[in-house]
Amino acid sequence: MAAALACPHYGTAAGATAQRTREVPPALTDMTVGPHIGVSNGTDVHLSSADLWAGAFISGAPGSGKSETVHNIWGYECMDYADPSGRTGHPGRHNTMVAFESKSADGVRGYQKWLAAGGAPAYIVDMADPASLAIDMLGSGSVTERVDALLSQLVYAFGEDSIGPRSQMTLRQVIAVAMQLTDDDAAAANMPAGSSFMDFAGALLQLRGDEVGKALYESAVHRSTDAYGDFPGTQQLVEALTFIAPLYGQGVTPSQRRGLCEAPQSKVMVLLSVPSWWSPSRASIDFATVLDRHVPVIINT
């Protein structure tokens, strides 16, 4: 039933609903249409490459071969990437292939083997391995644009019920300042050199205690005064410090700060569970570059 509703090629073949094997529409038995996914009544069945841009949904019981099917589709696209067929609906080297592997290292190796078989290059992103690439979550643009982009990702990942309007406001204020802090600010707060903006965000949210967060704020304020007026990005820092005043401005008590920081703290703690991901010393690539270069990417989470 689901196939009949979702597959535009079915047409009049979507007849009786109580049968174990459906009649496959002719459009999906042509080997040139796309990747082979199985056999029905002795007939080879393919997916349509021209329609894969819109998505493919694979369902089945545990152990039924869902991951293998995904790998086979990936393998088909790898072959067409390495040696473009030129067929209609086949993007060849203009295909941007990104695999997210959340189950096992064997899955990563499966994707890699297909790439190797086709002789295609790849970016390997191993989330927990500091030696591999990371994905730049901030992108380009002004501080405000990058903060908004990251916050949008966090709300999408955690859910609007988990990151409400008040937490969003606090995170926006904190991250905007954290992105502009330096090793000098870290030294003023007794934090290690090479701290990431996420380390700074956690400190401003009191994960290292009130004194550390306050020291970071005061160092940034000092750096943004007229004496440092030629410092690159000072105007953006001044604006960020203005917005964070409800947390660290004059007259705000530690208990008031604590009340504002408690909700978003847990989200930043999760993000800091993989500290190397945010490290400024770790090589990274953003999705704009991935899309522009069309180099396959495997992301192991």
Image (tube, rainbow, N blue to C red):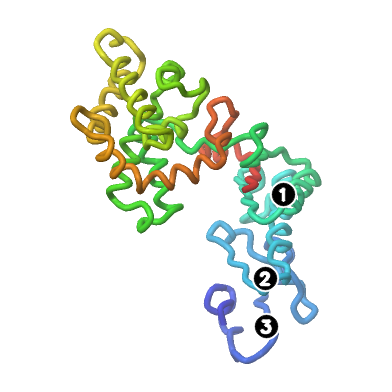
Question: Label 2 sits on what residue type?
Answer: Leu
Q: Position of residue 144 (x, y in %)?
A: 33, 33
Q: Is residue 229 left or right of residue 26?
A: left
Q: Position of residue 47 (x, y in %)?
A: 66, 65
Q: Which mark is residue 28?
A: 2
Q: Residues within 10 Å of mark 1 (few under 14, many from 20)?
A: many
**Which one is earlier in the sequence, the residue at label 3 or at label 2?**
3
Query: Of 203 and 238, which appears nearest the observer?
Result: 203
Inspect the image, locate mark 1, and give the three-letter code of the amino acid beneath it: Val
- Residue 77 in the image: state x and y as whole percent: 69, 52
- The reply to whether dot 3 and dot 1 touch (C-beta < 8 Å) is no
Residue 88 position in % (x across, y down): 63, 55
Distance from Cα at disc 2 to Cα at disc 1: 29 Å
How would you rate the neighbour count of disc 3 (Cα within 10 Å): few for under 14, some for 14-19, many for 20 or more? few
Quadrant housing residue 52: bottom right
The answer to whether one can see residue 122 in this image is: yes
Residue located 55% across and 61% down the image? 55
Seen from this angle, which residue lies furthest left? Answer: 251
Q: Which residue is mark 3?
A: 23
Q: Label 2's element?
A: helix
N-terminal of the two: label 3 or label 1?
Answer: 3
For the point 32% across and 47% down, which residue is it?
A: 167
Say the numbered circle drawn on residue 214: none
Q: Nearer the viewer, mark 2 or mark 1?
A: 1
Kind of element beneath mark 3: loop
Identify the residue position indicated by label 1 in the image: 108
Element type where label 1 sits in the image: helix
The amino acid sitting under disc 3 is Glu
